[in-house]
Amino acid sequence: MGFDFDVILSKQDQLISGIAMTIFVWVVGTLLAALIGFIVATARRYGGVLVDKALTVPIEVIRGTPFLVQLFLLYFGGPYIGLSLDALPAGLLALSVYGAAYFAEIFRAGYQSVPPGHVEAAECLGFTRIQIIRNILLPEMALLVIPPSVNMAIILLKETALLSLITVPEMTMTASAIGSQEYAFVEAMVLIALVYWVLVELAGLLGRFAEKKLSRYRLAKA
Amino acid sequence: MSDNAISVQHLVKRFGTTTVLDDISLEIPRGQVSCLIGPSGSGKSTLLRCMAFLEEATDGSIFIEGSPLGFVYDGAGKRQRQSANDLRKVRSQIGMVFQQFNLWPHMTALGNVSAALRRVRKMGKAEAEEKAMLQLRKVGLENRAGHYPSQLSGGQQQRVAIARSLALEPKIMLFDEPTSALDPELTGEVLNVMRGLASEGMTMVVVTHEIGFAATVGNQISFLDHGKLLFTDAPSKVFAKPRHPRLEQFLDTYLDRGASTLI
């Protein structure tokens, strides 16, 4: 028997809403993860030894356990400690926190890559700490943090598929449902594999574009 | 207010159990060039960095134009950190030039020089860049304004760094081995800019291995060794014979390299 994509495509409305949900969870989750990760890395840099040490623990725990386990713990275990979340907010929270642990390390490396003298020069000129982060540290580390950030975004996109297991109606869940109903499971999986791959390529493209734009001053040699 | 731009009083700096600066007291007269010389590890760079509060002294005080730098003593005589705002205010009177230039690689020469005018002095872009161009002209680099640091030679980078510090019109300029990363030819162009500044009456503190520069441009020379300030005097006295035995030993290494004509 041959593949029959028509039955899948006849459910395109459901599919499109699943894809839209995946993109939504992915983009919002990644942005939140990057934001939290940046805040954590900044707190570790400026908050003193205690804050630095205290923040190491959650980072190590999150990086040391599978995302699926964390997701289940939050969604099914949360209610035991009074944290009853619907599937979507639970999924978004789990994804953001999971990604944040990695982004925190990416930004820590970014901070460390900037020569201390560049910061000292700004301090001597009277820049405030926030001005130094904004005008010196972030622009200088940008080129270094982009490739691992894109990488992380790609990983997070693929992890969104696991949200189907707590009933977030994203594209893996939608496609499995359609595939089972229509006896076209493999076709459904082939289709969403393609969509995931296209999204990954788009993310990579965006990253390379940003790198190229930022690297103009590094490549420039007299 | 005294005649001294900087007053260092009983400064002590320890890293763990190592004493890097051992009870240093030094007056930097206004409008003059003070040079700090001494072998590597003598503490001269650390002393200079303390004057910019890039290093926190373990004990003692530094006054910039009469104001305490970094630490203040409360009513009970206890040493406390100055507020970030007060520190910025005192620091705004000094400009610092580093051995490694420390230009920001993502900004052009003009961007480097105008950044503090825009961020710290809150000037508009046009005004800040106009002022920055004046400083770049002063160091002879107005035609390099649009270049990134990676497109400039070491000497040009250091001149941009000097212009960057001058942009905020500091009263005192600190130089931390400004030519140590440069070859002799590039060293010359940076020293020329510094000579120009000195002739305008800028108060300068220069940590240097350029004994010739110290002897010809310096008004006062301080010699440090093993964290101790051995003496401070006018160059004519410092280099006149008989010399301090430790200085004699130090200078011998220069004479060995054929630099005797400079001294």
Image (cartoon, coloured by chain):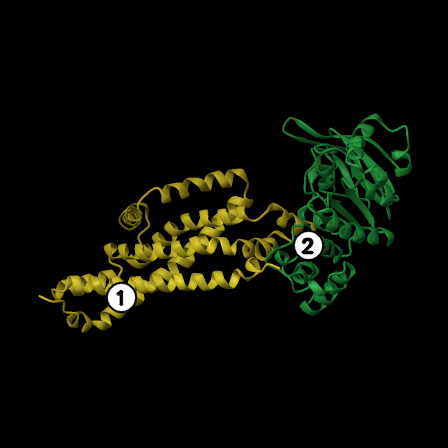
Q: What's the chain of the residue with tag 2?
A: B
Q: Amino acid at mark 2?
A: Gln
Instruction: Say which element carries label 2.
Output: helix
Q: Residues within 10 Å of mark 2 (few under 14, many from 20)?
A: many
**Mark 2 lies on residue:** B157
Q: Position of residue B140 (x, y in %)?
A: 76, 60
Q: Position of residue A148 (x, y in %)?
A: 43, 53
Q: Amino acid at mark 1?
A: Gly
The chain letter of the yellow chain reads A
Q: Residue at x 39, y 61 (%)?
A: A204
**Mark 1 lies on residue:** A18
Q: Residue at x 88, y 34 (%)?
A: B238
Vertical placement of B100 versus A217: above or below?
above
Vertical placement of B36 versus A144: above or below?
above
In the image shown, does A92 or B96 lie closer to the viewer? Answer: B96
Residue farthest to the left?
A1
Residue B76 occupies quadrant = top right
Vertical placement of B67 versus B152: above or below?
above
Residue B29 occupies quadrant = top right
Q: Colour of chain B?
A: green
Q: Is residue B24 something that shows in the picture? A: no
Q: Is residue A8 something that shows in the picture? A: yes
Q: Position of residue B141 (x, y in %)?
A: 73, 61
Q: CA distance from mark 2 to mark 1?
A: 55 Å
Q: Residue at x 70, y 47 (%)?
A: B182
Q: Is residue A14 left or right of residue B27?
A: left
Q: Residues within 10 Å of mark 1 (few under 14, many from 20)?
A: many
Quarter that holds the N terminus of chain B: top right
In the image shown, does B125 or A218 lie closer to the viewer? Answer: A218
Instruction: Say which element carries label 1.
Output: helix
Q: Is residue B138 left or right of residue A7?
A: right
Quarter that holds the C terminus of chain B: top right
